[in-house]
Image: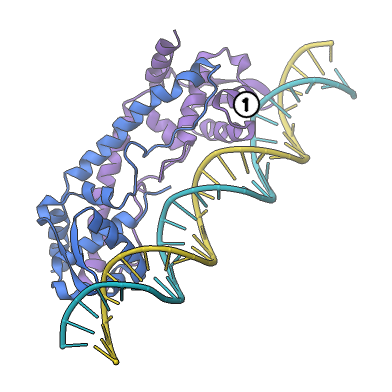
Chain colours: A purple, B blue, C yellow, D cyan
Amino acid sequence: MTISSRFSVAIHMLTLVALSPPEVISSDFLARSVNTNPALIRKIMAMLKKAELIQVKPGVAGATLKKSLNAISLLEIYQAVSVVEPNELFGIHDQPNPACPVGRNIQTTIEPLFITAQSAMERVLEQITLGDVVKDIEQLAD
Amino acid sequence: MTISSRFSVAIHMLTLVALSPPEVISSDFLARSVNTNPALIRKIMAMLKKAELIQVKPGVAGATLKKSLNAISLLEIYQAVSVVEPNELFGIHDQPNPACPVGRNIQTTIEPLFITAQSAMERVLEQITLGDVVKDIEQLAD
DNA sequence: TTACCTGTAATTATGATGGTTACATGTAAT
DNA sequence: ATTACATGTAACCATCATAATTACAGGTAA
């Protein structure tokens, strides 16, 4: 099991948007850097647009960020691409036996524990911004 | 995307092992409480056995825990059922374009961030024990 | 021997992912 | 307006993990 690479692709895309002159940013350009195909890029662009992280004009190349680099957290990107639904990182088996004291109560017992674990992970993502990523990339690119 | 319910099933199973007289614990009994089929239970039993969390004798019902309730963390169970591989909760797209400064460095930049997030989640699981779960279940079952 | 169990392989259906093609629609320059 | 190029989407497909299921070999004890 892994969380979909849509997330890492979205970060990659936004980093490119941040670092490249707007008129270069086409789905074709992004696809070549990510190494995938333009249609997939456009699907993810649609999600990022819906989440109001980028601005795109239909028919014309040149996406731009709608917020400042440091105002975009990795959590927002992760949520934008719907890679994990809220409170559903962990799957819980459904319909355990209600006639059994354990079966009857296992879901109620486990759910808050799982949510706590998921939240801890998401709080880390919340504290990292696109600005941090861009800064790292710039240093490595020198 | 969700982490396989194998994890919640394993917790359910171990809770039953902890709370039931040994001679009752057959894969059939566990399957009825979990509401799945005995073969799947036996597969998970094999994983828990390999991780040295339980003892099972082939041919005879009656699994028992190999460690005390409070010495078994949810992290150990989660690792036992291989629900997430170490450092691979998040998938990263492979083969980004090395000719692009972003493509060339994105993996190196993102990987430690993802590992930090995953670790935060796992550290929560590490601090919860099977004993905590059993205690909660017992209270609810009253 | 009988009855019941575990261990495990093989098969299947399902659902998410990611790749791909195709095309309708929008934009702007000539 | 026509052309060139872009986005927005739908549709389709191959692949993979999960979970359900069947089947059977082998262990155990009355």
**Residue at the (33%, 56%) spot, across then down:** B6
Label 1 element class: helix
Q: Is residue D14 above or below residue D23?
A: above
Q: In this view, does A52 lie above or below B70?
A: above
x and y percentages locating residue B33 in the rendered image? 28, 71
Relative placement, left or right, of C4 versus A30 is: left
Name the residue tied to disc 1: A27
**Residue at the (40%, 18%) spot, across then down:** A131
Q: Looking at this view, is A74 or D21 the one in front?
A: D21
x and y percentages locating residue D22 in the rendered image? 46, 76
**Residue at the (38%, 45%) spot, across then down:** A86
Relative placement, left or right, of A28 versus A99 is: right
**Residue at the (12%, 59%) spot, across then down:** B135
Q: Looking at this view, is B11 or A134 the one in front?
A: B11
x and y percentages locating residue B132 in the rendered image? 14, 54
x and y percentages locating residue B127 in the rendered image? 16, 44
